[in-house]
Image: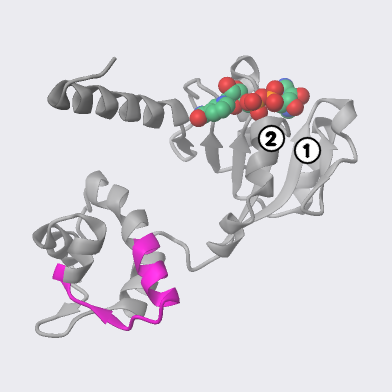
Amino acid sequence: MEEREISRAVIGRLPRYYRYLGELLDAGVERISSNDLSKKMSVTASQIRQDLNNFGGFGQQGYGYNVKYLYTEIGKILGLNRQHNMIIIGAGNLGQALANYASFEKSGFSLKGLFDVNPRLEGVSIRGIPVRMMDELKDFLKHNEIEIAALTIPKSKAIEVADLLVANGIKAIWNFAHTDLNLPDDVIVESVHLSDSLMKLSYNITSYNEEHGSKA
Ligand code: NAI
């Protein structure tokens, strides 16, 4: 098949398709038409067909989509068909919340370690994983195959710690610290800003109120 660049927008929509298809699978649904998927997901059927055509079109005329097949193929595209070993740097509020969220494991993200500088956290375990001190990091990375590091530390420390991670072989960073990391091109960074989502919510509240007349 001819290699084609898939647009960022399509890639951005794939996790949602994957989530819905996973729910359909769990509910025992074997196949679904693009129209039914469209109603369920509030996306137009033509958008669904267009998106999925990027991957050679998994649908069949008159049959719809085979849910298991589509789920598996999208999983492969997203790289979820293999395990990703992960560590969390910063075992504070957010780091511990992420570590406690066991569902990531179901998608293949396996938490192998938690690191912090606060000696009071030494020995604390989250889901059986002990918090280690940062001076153990180098050795830990030498002896464990870790692909992803989540950064849940203060912004002021993020750049320095990201550099340390990269110098010790980390190739992917899930960055929660609100700062841009200037890392080599072969290091993949995905930054998360929950506040962006909250601002979108605020925008939607504001425009709803403008349309319907605010009571405020
Ligand atoms: P927190 O203060 O509870 O936890 C931060 C932890 O990092 C502490 O345990 C601290 O000891 C540790 N730490 C500090 N320097 C370190 C270093 N050099 N190496 C390793 N660990 C170190 O803070 P919280 O609430 O967990 O937030 C963590 C970060 O995530 C902050 O930068 C915050 O702004 C950010 N954040 C981002 C969100 C987002 O949507 N991107 C949402 C919430 C928080």
Q: Does 34 appear above or below 158? A: below
Image location (x, y in percent) of residue 82? 53, 66
Identify the residue under disc 1: 137
Q: Residue at x 9, y 61 (%)?
A: 46
Disc 2 + disc 1, Cβ < 8 Å: yes
Q: Residue at x 55, y 43 (%)?
A: 171
Q: Amino acid at mark 1?
A: Leu
Give the distance between the C-alpha atoms of the residues marked 2 and 1, in whole angstroms: 10 Å
Identify the residue under disc 2: 89
Classify mark 1 as within 8 Å of ligand 1 or not, answering yes or no.
Answer: no
Image location (x, y in percent) of residue 176? 54, 30
The answer, for residue 164, to whether it is visible in the render is no
Q: Earlier in the sequence, mark 2 or mark 1?
A: 2
Q: Residues within 10 Å of mark 2 (few under 14, many from 20)?
A: many
83 drawn magenta: no
Q: Does residue 36 appear left or right of residue 139 in this picture?
A: left
| Number of disc labels | 2
- Which part of the image, by quadrant, shows the C terminus? top left
The answer, for residue 38, to whether it is visible in the render is yes
Q: Does 156 appear above or below 24? A: above
Magenta span: 18-35
Classify mark 2 as within 8 Å of ligand 1 or not, answering yes or no.
Answer: yes
Q: Does residue 18 appear left or right of residue 116 in this picture?
A: left
Q: Residues within 10 Å of mark 1 (few under 14, many from 20)?
A: some
